[in-house]
Image (spheres, grey):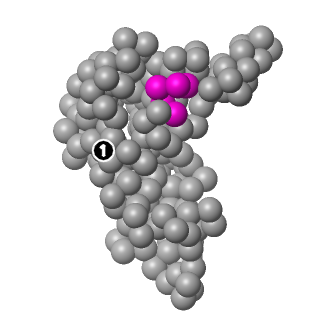
């Protein structure tokens, strides 16, 4: 907490908006309490408690959804990507996801790859709980992750948020005017 507090203060002191990349529910609450301007991701490591959701609803720091991030690589490999991804991405790149070399793992996520579906389910539940509580959100994709293609993947993110039960109006606002 002390390191985060100092980093946020320093960012603000030099005129920057502190954006904090989080993974757990505790990370999200601490970053919001310490004054982050934006939170990247809903938690994927655990589900927010009712008390944590209430705290985040009171503070109202927006978060970026990134729901498709954990599943994009596998999805592109299985389906060949979305129609828009196939239209704008090099076909060889899309095809490479369907033929991963034996033993291939995304660096930094080797031990988590088998847990991505469960982590994505926790993210989805956290998004639902946060948005029901009125926590502001922006639609985003975490471009740079395997299978997340700048621009094109935003459409997949929107689709996943609609599947998660968010209203089309809220999603459109969070993808356009809210940010």
Q: Position of residue 127 (x, y in %)?
A: 32, 36
Residue 39: percent from left, percent from top:
52, 29
Residue 143 point in image, percent of width and height: 56, 49
Q: Secondary structure at mark 1?
A: helix
Number of other residues with Cα within 10 Å of mark 1, as a class: few under 14, some 14 to 19, many 20 or more? many
Residue drawn 22% across the image and 46% down it: 163
Depth check, front residue: 8 or 50? 50
Q: Is residue 106 visible?
A: yes
The answer to whether residue 76 of the structure is visible from this angle is no
Nearer to us in this view, 167 or 86: 167
Relative vertical location of residue 75 with respect to residue 128 in this rendering, above or below: below
The image position of residue 69, as x and y in percent, is: 46, 52
Please tell me whether residue 141 is drawn above or below residue 58 in the rendered image: below
Quarter-wise, where is residue 51 in the image? top left
> Residue at label 1?
124
Give the answer, above or below, for where 107 lies relative to 119.
below
**Over which residues does the magenta segment extend?**
27-31
Instruction: Give the tally of numbered discs.
Output: 1
Q: Quadrant of residue 78?
A: bottom left
């Amino acid at each position: 907490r002390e390191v985060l507090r100092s980093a946020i203060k320093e960012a603000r002191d030099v005129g920057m908006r502190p954006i904090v990349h989080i993974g757990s529910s505790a990370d999200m609450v601490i970053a919001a309490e310490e004054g982050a301007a934006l939170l990247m991701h809903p938690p994927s490591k655990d589900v927010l408690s009712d008390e944590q959701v209430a705290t985040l609803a009171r503070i109202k720091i927006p978060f970026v959804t990134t729901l498709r991030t954990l599943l994009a690589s596998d999805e592109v490999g299985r389906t060949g990507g979305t129609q828009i991804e196939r239209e704008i991405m090099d076909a060889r790149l899309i095809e490479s996801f369907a033929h991963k070399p034996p033993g291939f793992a995304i660096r930094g996520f080797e031990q988590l790859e088998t847990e991505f579906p469960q982590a994505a389910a926790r993210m989805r539940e956290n998004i639902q709980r946060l948005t029901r509580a009125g926590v502001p959100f922006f639609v985003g994709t975490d471009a740079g992750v395997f299978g997340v293609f700048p621009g094109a993947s935003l459409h997949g993110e929107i689709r996943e948020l609609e599947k998660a039960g968010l209203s089309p109006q809220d999603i459109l606002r969070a993808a356009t005017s809210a940010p």
